[in-house]
Image (cartoon, coloured by chain):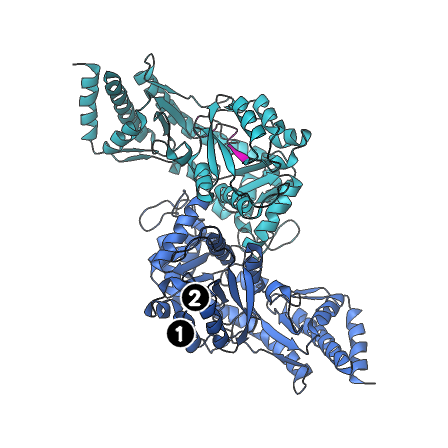
Chain colours: A cyan, B blue
Amino acid sequence: MSELESLTAAYQNLKARNQNIDMTRGKPSAAQLDLAAGMFDLVHSDDCKGEDGTDYRNYGILAGIPEARKLFARLMETAPDRVIVGGNGSLAMMYDALAGAVTFGVPGGDGPWNGAKFLCPVPGYDRHFAICERLGIEMLPVEMLDDGPDMDAVEAMVAEDASIKGIWCVPKYSNPTGAIYSDLTVDRLAAMKCAAPDFRIIWDNAYVVHHLTGEIATVKNIQKAAEAAGNADRILTFVSTSKISLAGAGVAAMSASEANVKDALERMFFATIGPDKINQLRHVRFFKDQAGIEAHMKKHAEIIAPKFAVVEEALSKAFAGTDLATWTKPEGGYFVSVDLTDGCAAETVKLCAEAGVKLTASGACFPYGKDPRDRNIRLAPTMPTPDELERAMEVFCTTAKMVCLKNKAG
Amino acid sequence: MSELESLTAAYQNLKARNQNIDMTRGKPSAAQLDLAAGMFDLVHSDDCKGEDGTDYRNYGILAGIPEARKLFARLMETAPDRVIVGGNGSLAMMYDALAGAVTFGVPGGDGPWNGAKFLCPVPGYDRHFAICERLGIEMLPVEMLDDGPDMDAVEAMVAEDASIKGIWCVPKYSNPTGAIYSDLTVDRLAAMKCAAPDFRIIWDNAYVVHHLTGEIATVKNIQKAAEAAGNADRILTFVSTSKISLAGAGVAAMSASEANVKDALERMFFATIGPDKINQLRHVRFFKDQAGIEAHMKKHAEIIAPKFAVVEEALSKAFAGTDLATWTKPEGGYFVSVDLTDGCAAETVKLCAEAGVKLTASGACFPYGKDPRDRNIRLAPTMPTPDELERAMEVFCTTAKMVCLKNKAG
């Protein structure tokens, strides 16, 4: 029996198991959510006042409570007055920033972003790309390298085309490759000459403290680099506690230059009376300070690092020494990015689903959902239990190898 | 000494007291917020699952948790699948609905709302008008009568001008007059012939259960009336618990036709991963059902009805039998609307502020902040303590009467 024949037989056996495992999204597991136990018990209705006596149960405080702005300022390496603390999701703040740019424009620009284009390092985060697609912002892919986007390409494009208004960046443990932006990449992004005077870098620092190993990556402060280069308004930085405290009941924040914070608050004034300050207070009391956040993240790593090890082991066992697949070995974040033989991703995802393992849709990490080489698959190991994950990886590796070998055989 | 002279002397005395009382906004008092004591203690991290076992701490569930949709469906007199339960403010949902209409259009229309106009019953809610102003929607005032907007004027305008895309309505205990829409007004709004095929009634039912007296007003179900008239997609209804549970940490909801709910969810998909479901769960557990909400609102009425009585008594004492002022006697809601002699509102608000009583800016209840007769002032009695309110009303009545008499004297 050839390897392809034995893989095909193995696949049929796995399919007969009728499994149902979901690896589509980067969701924390129940065990991770349990780490925030106690969060809900820290604020009571007789204990809802801020440091200055303000009753946080009432309306107002558009920029978030001062205690939370302070906590996030440390996390975001900036000053509290440069931070806006919002609701339960940073995606909403990013959408609002870009929808605002399209409708009203941004500081330094000359009005609404009509016919805007955005650079999209690929593979990247599907929800970023979905925002652009929805808002009619044309997406231009650039290659993601190990130390950030291909800066030669980025610099050439932004220097020439004034309709290129921005770029999506996940600087640390990038989604999905786990890439960490080098100091040089940060400096080049901060200082590059842009034809658009209102160019914006959406710095989605989603995995700022989401380390998997003892190797804690640091990324150079791009806001400071941009200020030094005279481009203070270029950067919009976002974080959230969705993968620190609770995915659905966390707190998100934006930081930026004085002009950008003012612009965002002006926009927000029309759209909201203020964020849920009580949930912000819960977070401040739970984490207390940056050390509290970092200690908490070590507990996350203890839960999820073994899952990434399962993925690495399974991929190595199946593909090491072959020319069928390459994959990332992230030191943080939520994903492993796999590149199969060209033309094999969609078929693999489809056959995995038929065998009961749902993966992120192939192409999802590319603008308009189209992977030009049909080779990239994003694996999200955090949500399944370790046992489910082992079984899911067996299905994935068997299926992917079968598809690649079949492809090779023509 | 003339009445004007004695009022002027009284004003100077009041000014010398150096008071500092804020009546600018319709905020609940601390005593009202205390009614929700216990709300924060009803959900714990080991008890965060929905009826179907879903872990509400995690991502997702764009339309809100089923339990909350059911609770709001009863409050909004519709079916749970016609309800979207969101974050902590209905203003955000209204902004999103109109920003979506301007950027993308709505079901039944032919694309983005360019050059749209909106009917604004006046006096009305300043934050409604602010949304229009921000989004470039031209505002056309129509007179607010005791039973809703002047429908003869409304019908004539919407029949003729296809660029009139909607109208703001607060159907019960309207902000600020306390008007209650009659069945006839509801039927006319639901059935009127609109030149714009995508006309929308923003039905901001902000005070749906906010009764001040035993007289509980009911307003005819406009969604059903619109469906009967073949205009199901015309209505977008909003409520929130901001003035039921907690002003800053409540839960808001929208209900509408199937097509409008689908449209809103499609729009929301790009802007958020989902609402804070834990806070929704807190509300479901706290109120349990409609009877729980209604019982809770009686406690609010016990706190705020005496404050409205203070306002009424002060206004009667100062102005009954004069031709200087008329005012509303609301059976619910958060405001008393006062019409002074033409040309006297701005001066009264200014002089009250100088005497330490901050009122809502004059003109705030009109589009672009411009009261053409400069006569209307919105009083918001809920936030001050009863003692503060008495002192504030002394300042207001003294000042207003002084200004009106001075005006009369030429």
Q: What residue do we see at 56% from left, 26% from top?
A: A155
Res. B209 in view: no
Q: Is residue A254 above or below residue A225?
A: below
Q: Secondary structure at mark 1?
A: helix
Q: Secondary structure at mark 2?
A: loop
Residue A380 at x, y percent in the picture:
38, 31
Seen as rendered, the residue at the extreme bottom is B321
Residue lying at 75% horizontally and 68% vertically, measured from the top left: B355
Mark sitting on residue B332: none
Q: Which residue is mark 2?
A: B195
Amino acid on which disc 2 is placed: Ala
- Residue A4 can be seen in this image: yes
Q: Is residue B2 left or right of residue A214?
A: right
Task: Name the residue furthest right.
Answer: B1
| B400 relative to A351, above or below | below
In the image shown, does A162 or A63 lie closer to the viewer?
A162
Residue at mark 1 to residue at mark 2: CA–CA distance: 18 Å
Tag 1: amino acid:
Asp
Assess whether residue A171 is covered by the magenta stretch. yes
Q: Which residues are magenta?
A: A165-177
**Eye-nearest disc, 1 or 2:** 2
Magenta stretch: residue A312 in it?
no
- Name which quarter of the figure residue A256 lies in: top right
Residue bearing mark 1: B187
The subunit letter for the residue under badge 1 reads B
